[in-house]
Image (cartoon, grey):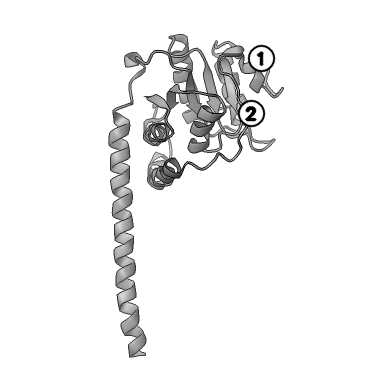
C-alpha cells in the first residue's frame, strides 16, 4: 500500500496546483474583462455613438403569462427610451425562441411596440440562445457593425468583450433600474460564463443556428412569425 500512497501524493499535489492555476487564470480574465468593459459602458444621458445600426437588447426570462421578468422589462424600458432619443434607427430583440411554448422575442417586441416603438423598426432574432449567439448573429445575419448593447451591467462586460472579439464596434448602456432577486447567484455564474465566452470569442465557432441575411435598414416585419398583434 505504501508505494501506491507515495505515487498518489505527487498526483494530488499536481492536481491542487492545477486547480489553483486555473482559478487564478479565471480570476485574472474576469478582472481584465470587467476593466475593459467599463471603458465602453455609458449612461443613457451620456451616450454619444453616432451611426449605430441598432440597439441590441439581450433576452432574459419571460413568465408563464407571457410578460417579461423584471430584468428583461428593465432592458426593454431602457432600450425603447434610447430608440426614442435617436440612439439608433432600429431595435434588435435577441432571445430564446427555440421551443414553441417558450418565446422571449415576441414578448420583447410586444413590450416595445406597446411602449410606442413602430413595429417596422423592431426586429426579432429568434435564435439568440446565448450571449455569443446574439452577438455573432447580429453581425453575420443582421449585418450589424456598430451597435448599442442594452442589458444589466454585470452582463455588459462579457457582451462588450464578445463584440470586440467579433469585430463589432459597440458601447453598452446598463439597465439596472432596480435590485434583482438572486443577483449574487448570477454574479457567481457569470465568472464561468466570461471564461467560456473568452474562448468562444477566441475561436469563433458558428452560432447554434445560422440563417439567411436580414437587412436592418428594411422593415422588422420580415422577422415576424405571426404570433404578435402588431
Q: Determine which of the numbered discs, if any, sits on residue 230 in the image.
A: 1
Q: Report x, y in % for residue 26.
A: 33, 50
Could you tell whether 60 is left or right of 199 in the image? right
Residue that appears at 47% across and 30% down: 71
Q: Determine which of the numbered discs, if any, sits on residue 19 in the image.
A: none
Using the image as rendered, state which of residue 210 and residue 78 is in the foreground: 210
Q: Report x, y in % for residue 172.
A: 38, 25
Q: If you read the primary sequence from the N terminus, does the residue marked by circle 1 or circle 2 appear first? A: 2
For the residues labelled 1 and 2, the Cα–Cα distance comes to 24 Å
What residue did someone put label 2 on?
212
In the rendered image, which quarter is residue 148 located in? Answer: top left
Mark 1 neighbour density, 10 Å: few (under 14) some (14–19) many (20 or more): few
Q: Report x, y in % for residue 207.
A: 55, 39
Residue that appears at 34% across and 68% down: 15
Is disc 2 placed on a helix, strand or loop?
Answer: loop
Using the image as rendered, state which of residue 194 and residue 84 is in the foreground: 194
Could you tell whether 81 is left or right of 64 in the image? left
Amino acid at each position: 500500500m505504501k508505494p501506491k500512497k507515495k505515487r498518489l501524493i505527487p498526483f494530488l499535489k499536481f492536481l491542487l496546483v492545477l486547480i489553483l492555476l486555473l482559478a487564478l487564470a479565471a480570476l485574472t480574465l474576469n478582472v481584465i474583462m470587467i476593466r475593459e468593459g467599463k471603458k465602453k459602458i455609458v449612461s443613457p444621458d451620456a451616450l454619444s455613438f453616432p451611426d449605430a445600426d441598432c440597439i441590441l437588447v439581450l433576452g432574459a426570462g419571460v413568465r408563464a403569462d407571457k410578460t417579461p421578468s423584471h430584468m428583461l422589462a428593465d432592458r426593454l424600458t431602457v432600450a425603447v427610451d434610447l430608440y426614442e432619443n435617436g440612439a439608433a434607427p432600429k431595435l434588435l430583440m435577441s432571445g430564446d425562441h427555440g421551443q414553441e411554448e417558450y418565446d422571449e422575442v415576441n414578448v420583447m417586441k410586444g413590450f416595445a411596440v406597446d411602449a410606442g416603438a413602430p413595429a417596422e423598426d423592431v426586429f426579432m432574432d429568434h435564435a439568440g440562445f446565448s450571449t455569443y449567439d446574439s452577438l455573432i448573429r447580429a453581425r453575420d445575419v443582421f449585418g450589424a457593425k456598430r451597435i448599442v448593447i442594452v442589458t444589466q451591467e454585470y452582463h455588459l462586460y462579457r457582451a462588450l468583450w464578445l463584440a470586440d472579439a467579433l469585430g463589432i464596434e459597440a458601447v453598452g448602456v446598463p439597465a439596472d433600474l432596480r435590485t434583482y432577486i438572486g443577483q449574487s447567484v448570477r454574479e457567481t455564474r457569470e465568472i464561468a460564463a466570461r471564461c467560456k465566452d473568452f474562448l468562444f470569442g477566441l475561436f469563433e465557432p458558428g452560432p447554434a443556428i445560422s440563417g439567411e441575411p436580414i437587412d436592418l435598414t428594411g422593415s422588422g416585419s420580415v422577422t415576424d412569425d405571426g404570433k404578435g398583434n402588431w
